[in-house]
C-alpha cells in the first residue's frame, strides 16, 4: 500500500508497517463518570509485554491531561490541559509504546471537571 508522506501533493511512499495486532488484543473504549478520572488498565502477563499503538481521549466539556504508565513509571504525559472537546490522539504507530516485561500499562485521563465526562479509546495488544 502507498500512503502520502506528508511532504506535498503526489508524494507517496510504500507503507511497510504491520497490518495486524498481536494475538492478545487489549483494545478498549471507556466512558467515565462526571468529574472522575478515566483509567484503562492493560493487563500484563508473565513473559509478555503490553504494546500501545494509539490512544485517543476527549472531554464532553472542560479540559484535562493524559498519562500512560508502565507499572509505576509514567512513560507518556500530554501537555497540561491538552485534552479537550476535540479528540487528543497519541499515535505511536506499528512499533508501539512497549511496556516492561510482565507489567501492566495504565492509561489515565484526569477529570475533565465538574459536570464533564471523559472518554478514552485505546488500541493495544500483548505478546
Image (tube, rainbow, N blue to C red):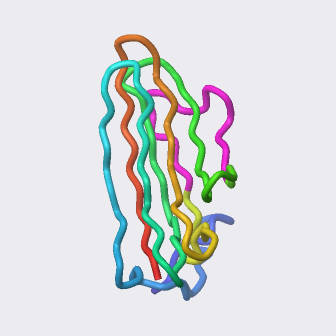
List the single residue furthest toward the top. Answer: 114
In the rendered view, tell whether residue 99 sits above or below residue 36. below
Is 32 positioned to the left or the right of 64 in the image?
left
Q: Nearer the viewer, residue 86 or 71?
A: 71
Is 19 positioned to the left or the right of 67 in the image?
left
Q: Quarter holding the N terminus?
A: bottom left
**Residue 117 appears at what percent x and percent y?**
35, 25
| Residue 24 image-quadrant placement | bottom left
In the rendered view, tell whether residue 62 sits above or below residue 21. above
Part of the protein shown in magenta: 76-90
Q: What residue is at 50 percent from the left and 83 percent from the top?
A: 2
Q: Nearer the viewer, residue 121 or 74?
A: 74
**Residue 115 appears at what percent x and percent y?**
35, 12
In the rendered view, tell whether residue 109 sits above or below residue 72. above
Q: What residue is at 53 percent from the left and 32 percent from the top?
A: 83
* Helix, strand or loop: magenta stretch: loop
Tell me if residue 3 is in the magenta stretch: no
Is 23 positioned to the left or the right of 100 in the image?
left
**Residue 65 appears at what percent x and percent y?**
58, 33
Tell me if residue 86 is in the magenta stretch: yes
List the single residue furthest toward the front. Answer: 46
In the rendered view, tell whether residue 72 sits above or below residue 95. above
Q: What residue is at 60 percent from the left and 82 percent from the top?
A: 13
Q: Nearer the viewer, residue 26 or 8?
A: 26
Is 35 positioned to the left or the right of 66 in the image?
left
**Residue 36 appears at what percent x and percent y?**
40, 25
Q: Nearer the viewer, residue 91 or 15?
A: 91
Count of numbered tags = 0
Q: What residue is at 52 percent from the left and 23 percent from the top?
A: 63
| Residue 82 image-quadrant placement | top right
Amino acid at each position: 500500500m502507498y500512503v502520502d508522506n506528508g511532504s506535498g501533493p503526489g508524494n507517496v511512499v510504500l507503507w511497510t508497517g504491520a497490518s495486524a495486532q498481536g494475538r492478545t488484543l487489549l483494545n478498549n473504549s471507556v466512558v467515565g463518570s462526571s468529574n472522575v478520572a478515566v483509567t484503562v488498565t492493560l493487563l500484563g502477563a508473565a513473559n509478555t509485554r503490553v504494546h500501545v499503538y494509539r490512544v485517543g481521549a476527549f472531554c464532553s466539556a472542560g479540559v484535562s491531561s493524559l498519562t500512560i504508565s508502565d507499572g509505576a513509571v509514567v512513560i507518556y504525559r500530554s501537555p497540561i490541559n491538552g485534552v479537550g472537546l476535540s479528540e487528543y490522539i497519541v499515535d505511536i504507530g506499528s512499533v508501539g509504546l512497549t511496556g516492561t516485561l510482565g507489567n501492566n500499562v495504565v492509561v489515565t485521563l484526569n477529570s475533565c471537571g465538574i459536570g464533564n465526562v471523559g472518554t478514552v479509546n485505546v488500541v493495544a495488544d500483548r505478546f
